[in-house]
Image (spheres, rainbow, N blue to C red):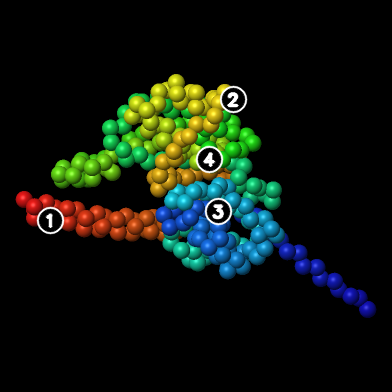
């Protein structure tokens, strides 16, 4: 009598996902007790849909821990699962302010924190910014430096390399500008300046402290020589205190890896575009109501 032995082999596949989110209603990316975070939402819905169970067994990993209020178009997570990953199924379960927009198959040893390049964008709305001076400051930051003064906590290694910083001012169509000049401070939101910073890795709060230095140089509180001293301090120097700028204007634009090409999903990207457009429409309605009230108050007091 012959006995047939059937062996079932479970094939685990490892996948990396690129995550877009609006950070306004999150207490940052990393899991924390009793507060809403991006990581907690992702884990909850991946478990709910049967993609992962035990985090250790699935080797769930993240690329970066953005602060509360920081947004993303390119943060990355990875995990392994026996289930074929369908990103729009996951997006249907996720809340609208966090969506998966791209995916890539990766090797089992892949760790998303070890990236080839990270790209952050900070958007400035301050008045009287000297773009030439901002670009001069950017040149000082480029290259490899000791960024111990640009992080909130002490770390073993504070040397980081800034590959590039691009300062740009988007062109605004004259027809789109606010015609009401009674409240000039309302118009500054129509002339943003982008500071795009590229590097392999960043310390905690590093980008937001860098932006504070950009502003301090612009307003004459620091010189370019002061920036050089902050970047390469002497060993016996006390750490300088640099106040971080607001997180709401910071976007993690993208993270790149050697040999990995993410496939963007057209439907997922369009879905997130619609969410952003609806968000913008709501903000425009709020703006219009406030503007109407301002004008009415002005006419009442004439």
Q: Nearer the viewer, mark 2 or mark 1?
A: 2
Label 3 secondary element: loop
Give the crowd class for mark 3: few <14, some 14-19, many >=20 residues within 10 Å: some
| Percent x, y of residue 236 | 59, 25
Q: Which mark is residue 30?
A: 3
Residue bearing mark 2 = 236
The answer to which image quadrant residue 138 occupies is top left
Residue bearing mark 4 = 152
Q: Nearer the viewer, mark 4 or mark 3?
A: 4
Q: Cα distance, mark 1 to mark 3?
A: 45 Å
Q: Cα distance, mark 2 to mark 4?
A: 18 Å
State whether residue 107 appears in this view.
Answer: yes
**Mark nearer the N terminus (4 vs 3):** 3
- The answer to the question of whether label 4 and label 3 lie on touching residues, with beta carbons closer than 8 A, is no
Q: Cα distance, mark 3 to mark 2?
A: 34 Å
**Mark nearer the N terminus (2 vs 1):** 2
**Mark nearer the N terminus (4 vs 1):** 4
| Percent x, y of residue 150 | 51, 35
């Amino acid at each position: 009598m012959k006995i047939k032995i059937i062996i079932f082999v479970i094939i685990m596949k490892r996948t990396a996902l690129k995550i877009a989110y609006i950070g306004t209603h999150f207490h940052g990316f990393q899991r924390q007790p009793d507060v809403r975070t991006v990581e907690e939402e992702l884990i909850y819905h991946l478990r709910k849909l049967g993609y992962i169970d035990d985090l250790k067994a699935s080797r769930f990993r993240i690329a970066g821990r953005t602060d509360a209020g920081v947004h993303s178009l390119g943060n990355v997570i990875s995990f392994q699962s026996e289930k074929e990953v369908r990103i729009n199924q996951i997006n249907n379960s996720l809340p609208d302010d966090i969506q998966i927009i791209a995916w890539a198959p990766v090797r089992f040893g892949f760790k998303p924190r070890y990236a080839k390049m990270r790209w952050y964008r900070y958007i400035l709305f301050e008045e009287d910014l000297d773009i030439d001076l901002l670009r001069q400051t950017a040149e000082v930051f480029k290259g490899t430096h000791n960024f111990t003064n640009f992080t909130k906590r002490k770390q073993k290694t504070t040397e980081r390399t800034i590959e590039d910083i691009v300062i740009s001012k988007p062109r605004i169509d004259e027809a789109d500008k606010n015609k009401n000049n009674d409240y000039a401070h309302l118009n500054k939101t129509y002339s943003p300046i982008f500071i795009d910073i590229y590097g392999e890795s960043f310390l905690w709060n590093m980008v937001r402290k860098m932006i504070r230095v950009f502003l301090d140089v612009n307003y004459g509180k620091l010189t370019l020589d002061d920036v050089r001293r902050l970047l390469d301090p002497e060993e016996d120097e006390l750490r300088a205190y640099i106040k971080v700028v607001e997180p709401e204007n910071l976007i993690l634009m993208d993270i790149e890896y050697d040999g990995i090409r993410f496939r963007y999903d057209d439907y997922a990207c369009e879905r997130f575009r619609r969410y952003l457009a609806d968000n913008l429409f709501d903000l425009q309605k709020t703006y219009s109501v406030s503007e109407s009230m301002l004008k009415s108050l002005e006419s009442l007091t004439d």
